[in-house]
Image (spheres, rainbow, N blue to C red):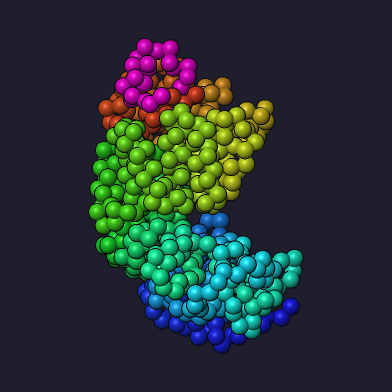
Amino acid sequence: MQNTFQPDLVAAQLDRIVSGPPLSSSPSLCRLLRFVVEETLAGRTGSLKEYSLGVVVFERGDEFDPRMDPIVRVQARNLRVRLAQYYAGPGADDLVVIDLPKRTYVPVFRCRIEEQTQAAPAQPAEPPVPAVEAAAEPSVERQLELPAELVVLASEPVDGKQFAARAPTGRIWPRPRWAMIAAVAVLALLGITAFWRFRPAETARLRPAETARKAIHEPDPTALDLYIRGRYLMDRQTEQSFHDSIDSFNRAVARDPQFAPAYAGLADAYNVLAQFGYISPKEGMEQARSAAQRALDIDPGLAEGHVSLAAIIEAYDWKWAAAEREYRRALELNPSLPEAHLWYGMFLRDQGRLQEALSELRRAAQLDPFSVFSSLNLAHAYMLAGNVSGAEEQARHAADLAPGTATAEVLLSNIYRAQGRAAEADAALSRARQFSAGNPHAISVLACAYGRHGQRDESVRLFHQLELLAKQRYVSPFDMGSVSLVLGDDQRALTLLEEAYRQRSSGLIFLRDAKFASSHRLPGFHSLVQKMHFAG
């Protein structure tokens, strides 16, 4: 079936969109929109894949790997938001609509005509008929009569066929919107004609106040790119990648001091740097708190800022109720924020609320399926729930996303061991050892794994490596105490864990984890758990 839309109308609309706010301030988003629209008009929708967009639009080079670099997905999400803002604002009366549906990079073109209607006797509603084969779910609220020659939807090929057709009846149905319903009610009270406007899906999910908030500040394009890079680097989970992410966030806020999400990213990077034991809790968490507070000072309604603050309150202040309030506030502000579901899920897991945690962690993985953090934490939760096959799937995914991640290999080893696959478990530990050189947190996790699997000599050798490292740099007393517990040196373990308590090490959150169950017999350990004041 041949395309029947008029390319000159779409091309003119494209020029109109990219020449003004909110798109004109972001050259990279303009390039993305122009490329996908022009390729679709030329009949080359098959080229609109994540790899080709990364190479051509974002100039990532031939070695671009979409699994490792989320630039295309993140920028497509940003483009959808900007398009929603455009059609809710300066483009509210435009005839041609260019949209980018979720889960595809092939744009949709529609034409709309807003009609003024005179009051008339109610007529029986005509049953709705889908506009095109690949159209979104239609609304039964209202039908808009359109010129048949202009109503077209270009969609992704299905079973090798390209669908792009005029509507059989020349009609298109906007989706129902609570804002529309409210507007109709008000206009009815005033006794005037109602005007219905198409509202893009992404804008419609935002409350009016939140939509207005997003329009407050348009980030500098370079700062936005640095922010995206910082988030990507932080998800790699190596000490160097954490430091590199901090550098990216610092450069972003230097470039654009009012870019609140970059401060939230900076807070998260310092937080995880401390939680992984690469710097002391005081050094990392105080800088994290300062950055999170700065993000919220700039934008009190920023969901990312509330997540950052919640994670600090949880991991450093140990104020569980206050942390949960912040997590819930973030989810209220943005229910589709992957980081909010991820961090809240980790919080629930560590508070012993496993079923609630699984729901949040699954949602985080659905929203961001290429996140190493999300995959590893969901795998860990599945293990706690006894879902070994689910844990293996997620852990493998994490290892594929970030090859060379020692913690992913150790988790896989534990999973294989639980399934009686000893050879594969040993191979995973060997790989983890290759990736752990000079990394105190990875060495600690590896030493515990060897100790639990009966390879005490290997565990002791790794513990000695930790002792040597502790003379050269910061090593978390929690990490060293965890290994001492596995080795059966209870007194030394308690001494180290007490020091971790004095330093407010975030690792103490895990004291109720099953791996510490054998230590509950120790009076000193029981006292330590009580001092944490866990809920439930």
Q: Quadrant of the C terminus?
A: top left
In this view of the protein, which residue sits in the foreground, 410 or 45? 45
Q: Is residue 305 left or right of residue 182?
A: left
Which residue is depicted at the point 57% across and 24% down? Answer: 453
Question: Residue at horizontal 49%, vertical 41%?
Answer: 360
Image height check: is 23 above or below 68?
below
Q: Nearer the viewer, residue 354 or 13?
A: 13
Q: Using the rendered view, name the quadrant where residue 65 is placed.
A: bottom right
What residue range appears in magenta? 516-536
- In the picture as drawn, the residue positioned furthest to the bottom comes out as 8
Q: Residue at x 52, y 51 (%)?
A: 367
- As drawn, 265 above or below 181: above
Residue 509 in picture, x, y percent from top left: 39, 30
522 within the magenta span: yes
Taking the image as drawn, is residue 467 in sight?
A: no
Residue 129 x/y as whole percent? 67, 68
Quadrant housing the N terminus: bottom right
Does 517 lie within the magenta span?
yes
Q: Position of residue 161 (x, y in %)?
A: 74, 71
Q: Is residue 206 above or below residue 341?
A: below
Which of the 4 image quarters holds residue 132? bottom right
Q: Nearer the viewer, residue 242 or 133?
A: 133
* In-image side of 264 versus 88 (left or right): left
Which secondary structure class fits the magenta region best? helix
